[in-house]
Image: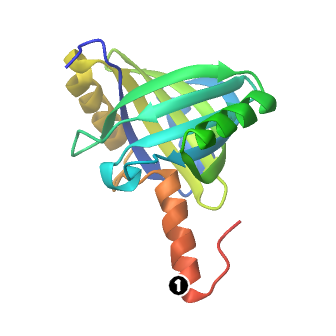
Amino acid sequence: MNSAETFEVELKFSIPDADDMTLQLLARGARRGGIVEQSDLYFQHPSRDFRQTHEALRLRKTRDGVRITYKGPIIDTRTKTRREIELPVGRGTGDFDQLRTLLTVLGFEPVRGVDKVRAIYELMWEGRELELAVDSVEGLGTFLEIESLAQEHDRETARDAILRLAENLGLKNSERRSYLQLLTEQSEAAKSTGEKPAE
């Protein structure tokens, strides 16, 4: 495996109170970043089922531009560690729409969107820079993501630092499903019961 490959090492937790979690993060020395609105659109591959391979292809639009991200299969049993390739591909809605059209022409099928407001924090923890995100996800609720980017040689170090921070915050029962998967399951459950999915 190429040692220059980048991996996203992540834990995610559903949290009841964003304000309380923010205070806990600040008490541990976290620095406030920005608050961003993220509009994501996920795609299905034309010849393999990403739901089975646990991969993802995403277009993301924010006020800072448009990015395309590929996420590989999860390769760790305790965290969501996976290969990640992310590139800037545009500046605004027009570029987002053009990329969506391009992918569709190539056979990729739009699956669904995920919209959220993300409050970003940075924390130096055990000598490692971690990114913390308090997410308000439309239709799902509030979550905390703890993330570090790593390469092959320090994946385990990143994982252990994230696990110890989660323990320090008293967080248990991490959510390994993506927001996309949670929303999809919620919609399918609502359809089976005849209820209207959450907006």
Picture layout, residue 31 above or below residue 166: above
Q: Amino acid under label 1?
A: Ser
Picture layout, residue 18 above or below residue 103: below
Compared across the picture, whether 117 is left or right of 6 comes to right
Compared across the picture, whether 71 is left or right of 88 comes to left
Where residue 97 appears, as percent x and y from the top left, is 74, 36
Tally of numbered tags = 1
Question: Is there any visible trace of residue 13 in the rendered image?
Answer: yes
Picture layout, residue 167 above or below residue 2: below
Looking at the picture, tell me which residue is in the foreground, 20 or 16.
16
Mark 1: secondary structure: helix
Sort mark 1 into few (<14), some (14-19) or many (20+) by Cα contacts within 10 Å: few
Residue at (75%, 21%) from the top-left corner? 91
Q: Which residue is mark 1?
A: 192
Looking at the picture, tell me which residue is in the foreground, 64 or 171.
64
Residue at (45%, 33%) from the top-left corner? 70
Residue at (34%, 53%) from the top-left corner? 172
Residue 52 location, quadrant: bottom left
